[in-house]
Amino acid sequence: MPAQTKQRDPYFDNLKGVLIILVAAGHCLNLYRDSNVYCNYLFHLIYAFHMPLFFYISGYFSKNVDKVSRKAFETLIIPAIPFELLYYLMHVVTKADNTQPLLTPVFAYWFCFALFFCRMLLPYLTRIRWIVPVTFALALAAGFNADINEYMTLSRFLCMLPFFMLGYYTTRDRMESIRKMNAALPVILGIAFAAAVFALLRFTGYDLGFTLRAPYSGKEGILFRGFQFLIAVPLSLLVMKLTPQGKSYLSVMGQKTLQIYFLHFYIVTAIKMVNPIADHSLLNFTLMVIAAPVIAAVLSCRPVSKCYDALINAMNKLIIKEGDL
């Protein structure tokens, strides 16, 4: 009898579809958050949990340690190379103010580099006792070191590593319990913490540092980072509970997260060029919210997938020696 092909669980594709829409939404909202209070609040709320949850799910699917470690360069760095170089060259040619060193991933390509480090180090990390609390403590302490910043995406790597390890140590039974849990508690906590984020933004005016890419601007920074680590859990549980279980169009987007991730930056840049006026209107906020799922849907369509796959296959053949693919 032929071996049975392992069937994909549409739930996880749906969850990744939700998360990639949130990634696009975060970058669309970021265009106007300095002048639009609605964009600023929703931006911070999204950043309070969406990347920790992405790393948590990535850790959950990294249980085949040898394979994910061996394939990390091929699956994460090679696809990032053409887009990272193109965006970097665009910054150099246009003399953009935010031109960065080549080893500082531009825009948001940091995700691939941080996840690459997580997977490459996984065989060693699993040998350390109490690795989850240790990595949380390290992430909190890292903010006091001014040298731990965006260079080589070190700050974000250290801050995402605890969630990656938490996902790695989540068993299948525990994941099923999360999927079946009563939604009441995460809903109540999610609403409470969302209100707390709003209150902090409204009454303190402090940069909460939810992007986790820089050291603390003051000693109180550790409190805000600890607060983010705390609220990421109920907000993530809420999203996980509300995610559809069966196949949907989210499943299609969830299977194409990397291509959406790499390509949506150019559409976001185009939005800024077409609509350069930063205003505080509710209309502008609404347009950014609507734009995110539209961008994800367009970039997950079959013609885009064919072009993307052709480019990545060409990069693999160019970089990886024949017989190693």
Image: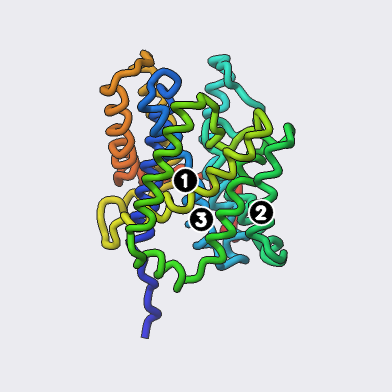
Instruction: Locate the N terminus by quadrant.
Output: bottom left
Q: What mark, if any, has residue 129 been given in the picture?
A: none
Query: Could you tell me which residue is drawn at 54 percent across and 41 percent down?
Result: 80
Neighbourhood count class around disc 3 (C-alpha, 10 Å): few under 14, some 14–19, many 20 upward: many
Neighbourhood count class around disc 1 (C-alpha, 10 Å): few under 14, some 14–19, many 20 upward: many
Q: What mark, if any, has residue 135 been given in the picture?
A: 2
Helix, strand or loop under label 2: helix
Q: Position of residue 214 (x, y in %)?
A: 63, 33
Query: Could you tell me which residue is drawn at 60 percent across and 54 percent down?
Result: 162
Instruction: Locate the C terminus by quadrant.
Output: bottom right
Helix, strand or loop under label 3: helix
Q: Earlier in the sequence, mark 1 or mark 3?
A: 1
Query: Could you tell me which residue is drawn at 51 percent across and 62 percent down?
Result: 60
Residue for badge 1: 49
Residue type pointed to by label 1: Phe
Residue type pointed to by label 3: Tyr
Q: Position of residue 93 (x, y in %)?
A: 56, 17
Tag nearer the camera, 1 or 3: 1
Residue for badge 3: 56
Q: Position of residue 173 (x, y in %)?
A: 45, 73
Query: Could you tell me which residue is drawn at 72 percent across and 64 percent down?
Result: 128
Helix, strand or loop under label 1: loop
Query: Residues under labels 1 and 3: Cα distance?
Result: 10 Å
Residue 255 visible in rendering: no
Residue type pointed to by label 2: Thr
